[in-house]
């Protein structure tokens, strides 16, 4: 493993949300100054997550999709099949960047990923995430503990967008949501993942490397496996 590595782990198949969330907490609570930074790439089973500042009034008609209150910032969002969820587990103090700069790095990585398919995207003041025109294509929700980040981004690629109509996405009534496939991008998540990983590593000044072995999370938690990434 080289200095400044970003170890990338790909969780196979569709993963339930809560075990991965608990694993992120455990990783963050037990890491030390020598623990390498990691990037977990996940596709979740359908779930609504409600951030610490979230208001239940923004959960309109969840139906058969569970709602999980979590310890990240932000309001309510949806995770489901066809969406890339990426969790950068970064020691900000070691990286020498602040939280605002970290958010900017993530947004820029998504913007640059979309640009690879000639999709023009941008930020919005006061509304973290990435937008194409007025429609949101990627959401952010983060937590920092002891100078280290967990939670991350959700990037819509090729999914059923109907569940977003059951909530006020990110707390904004009437917010339009889009995805790469509808913008002329690819349908395969793997193609987008490779580019997104490369762009995130570039923005953070790290070198993406496949993790050599799965972590041990404890009983009932998800068991991630490595993903092949481009240097």
Image (spheres, rainbow, N blue to C red):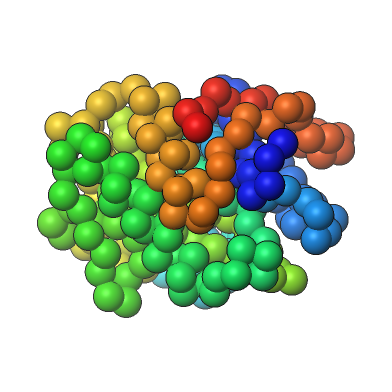
Does residue 199 appear left or right of residue 11 in this picture?
left
Could you say where residue 210 lies in the image, as x and y percent from the top left? 62, 30
Residue 118 visible: yes
User: In which quarter of the view is residue 180 placed?
Assistant: top left
User: In which quarter of the view is residue 140 placed?
Assistant: bottom left
Could you say where residue 95 lies in the image, as x and y percent from the top left? 61, 63
Could you say where residue 67 lies in the image, as x and y percent from the top left? 54, 52
User: In which quarter of the view is residue 7 placed?
Assistant: top right
In this rendering, the count of numbered labels is: 0
Q: Residue at x 13, y 56 (%)?
A: 133
Does residue 225 appear left or right of residue 45 in this picture?
right
Q: Residue at x 28, y 51 (%)?
A: 111
Q: Which residue is drawn at 46% across and 74% down?
A: 100
Query: Which is more toward the observer, 59 or 34?
Result: 34
Residue reaching furthest to the front:
3
Query: Which is more toward the observer, 99 or 159?
Result: 99
- In the picture shown, does residue 184 fall above or below 67? above
Residue 38 visible: no
- In the picture shown, does residue 193 fall above or below 74? above
- In the picture shown, does residue 106 fall above or below 71? above
Could you say where residue 19 lies in the image, as x and y percent from the top left? 71, 41
Does residue 215 appear left or right of residue 78 in this picture?
right
Does residue 137 appear left or right of residue 170 in this picture?
left
Q: Residue at x 25, y 26 (%)?
A: 186
């Amino acid at each position: 493993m080289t200095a400044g590595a970003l170890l990338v782990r790909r969780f196979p198949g569709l993963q339930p949300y809560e075990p991965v969330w608990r694993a992120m907490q455990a990783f963050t609570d037990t890491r030390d100054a020598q623990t390498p930074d990691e990037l977990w790439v996940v596709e979740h089973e359908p779930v609504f997550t409600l951030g610490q500042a979230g208001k239940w009034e923004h959960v309109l008609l969840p139906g058969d999709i569970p709602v999980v209150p979590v310890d990240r910032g932000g309001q309510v969002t949806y995770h489901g099949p066809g969406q890339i969820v990426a969790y950068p587990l970064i020691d900000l103090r070691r990286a020498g960047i602040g939280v605002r700069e970290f958010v900017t790095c993530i947004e820029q990585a998504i913007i640059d990923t979309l640009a690879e398919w000639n999709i023009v995207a941008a930020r919005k003041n006061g509304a973290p995430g990435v937008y194409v025109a007025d429609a949101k294509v990627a959401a952010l929700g983060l937590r920092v503990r002891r100078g280290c980040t967990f939670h991350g981004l959700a990037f819509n690629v090729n999914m059923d967008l109907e569940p977003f109509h059951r909530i006020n996405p990110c707390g904004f009534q009437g917010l339009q949501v889009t995805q790469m496939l509808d913008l002329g991008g690819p349908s395969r998540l793997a193609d987008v993942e490779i580019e997104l990983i490369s762009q995130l590593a570039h923005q953070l000044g790290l070198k993406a490397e496949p993790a050599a072995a799965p972590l041990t999370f404890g009983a009932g938690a998800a068991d991630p496996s490595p993903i092949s990434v481009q240097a």
